[in-house]
Image (tube, rainbow, N blue to C red):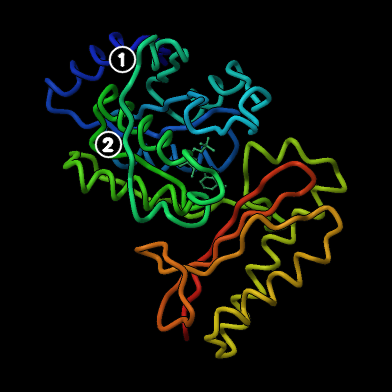
């Protein structure tokens, strides 16, 4: 397995593959890999001849008071996991390589970034869209795999690809969970054992919402209230948002006609966790 740290080296590597008319799949990550990432890579392996992963903790998607400095990192472990899962090449650039001095260009996806994390993390999706656009230009994938765990991110990337006419097929992979239901996340490592238990309220709130919708409830304010009440039972939980949105526009909806997505961001202690699920009217 190759590890490439320069933009130039990565472009040369990708270009040689493209010149042979072979296909590339890219799985972008911020590293500290878990089974969720590895599932994306296993899927990626089936989608193209060559599987690339990128590992880059992207500073432009972190706000000034967020966890950039303490974001967990372990490249040696990530390297082994990628190799085991069949990644051919890891793109592992430094911050200076991706954002040299005088860097000045950003991708801003409007509309679908108005709510949820777009509202609670100003600038976050500008950073995400910018780095993903760069990764696409550098790694030249035909296909890229993203997790539904970051639902709004998936919508943002799809919109960017459509609007900027990028030749990349975006494939979504369902959220991978621990056996007790907690969505896997590199940030779960921040949790104390007590907080790890309380973190289950995110999935419980989603399950409660699904149950209500299954029973015929369509009024999203009542569903949100039930979810909020449940989260309120965890002493170290504080809600960033609980919202029910249209799956395509990511705009909040008042009633569930057919399909909607419940998305939540909850702080457990100082760790901000997100989760989401589709709500389908029976
Ligand atoms: P990250 O390293 O957190 O930026 O995530 C890299 C990719 O892995 C993104 O496409 C995420 O949506 C995806 N991902 C992260 N956690 C999960 C999970 N639990 N299940 C599925 N995909 C995930």
Give left or right: position of 117 versus 20: right
| SS assignment at label 2 | loop
Q: Is residue 61 above or below residue 221?
A: above
Q: Which mark is residue 48?
A: 2
Q: Which mark is residue 43?
A: none
Q: Residue at x 76, y 49 (%)?
A: 268
x%, y% of residue 15? Answer: 19, 18
Tell me how far mark 1 sits from mark 2, CA to CA: 17 Å
Q: Nearer the viewer, residue 69 or 64?
A: 64
Q: Residue at x 36, y 48 (%)?
A: 156
| SS assignment at label 1 | helix
Q: Which mark is residue 10?
A: 1
| Image quadrant assignment for residue 164 | top left
Q: Is residue 126 above or below residue 240?
A: above
Q: Residue at x 74, y 61 (%)?
A: 201
Ligand 1 closer than 8 Å to the CB at disc 2?
Answer: no
């Amino acid at each position: 397995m190759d590890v490439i740290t320069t933009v130039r080296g990565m472009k040369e590597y990708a270009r040689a593959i493209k010149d042979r008319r072979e296909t590339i799949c890219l799985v972008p990550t911020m590293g500290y890999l878990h089974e969720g990432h590895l599932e994306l890579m296993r899927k990626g392996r089936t989608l193209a001849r060559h599987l690339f992963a990128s590992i880059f903790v992207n500073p432009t998607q972190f706000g000034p008071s967020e966890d950039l400095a303490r974001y967990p990192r372990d490249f040696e472990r990530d390297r082994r996991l990628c190799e085991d899962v069949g990644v051919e090449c890891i793109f592992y650039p430094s911050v200076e390589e991706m954002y040299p001095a005088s860097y000045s260009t950003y991708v801003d996806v409007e509309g679908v970034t108005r709510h949820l994390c777009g509202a609670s993390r100003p600038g976050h999706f500008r950073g995400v869209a910018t780095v993903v656009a760069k990764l696409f230009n550098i790694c030249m994938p035909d296909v890229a795999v993203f997790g539904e765990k970051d639902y709004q991110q998936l919508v943002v990337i799809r919109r960017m690809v459509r609007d900027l006419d990028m030749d990349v097929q975006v494939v979504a992979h369902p959220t991978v969970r621990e056996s007790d239901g907690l969505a896997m996340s590199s940030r779960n490592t921040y949790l104390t054992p007590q907080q790890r238990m309380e973190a289950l309220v995110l999935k419980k709130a989603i399950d409660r919402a699904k149950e209500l919708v299954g029973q015929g409830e369509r009024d999203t304010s009542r569903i949100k209230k039930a979810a909020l009440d449940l989260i309120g039972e965890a002493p170290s939980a504080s809600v960033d948002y609980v919202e029910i949105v249209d799956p395509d526009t990511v705009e909040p909806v008042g009633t569930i006609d057919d399909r909607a997505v419940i998305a939540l961001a909850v702080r457990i202690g100082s760790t901000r966790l997100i989760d989401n699920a589709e709500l389908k009217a029976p």
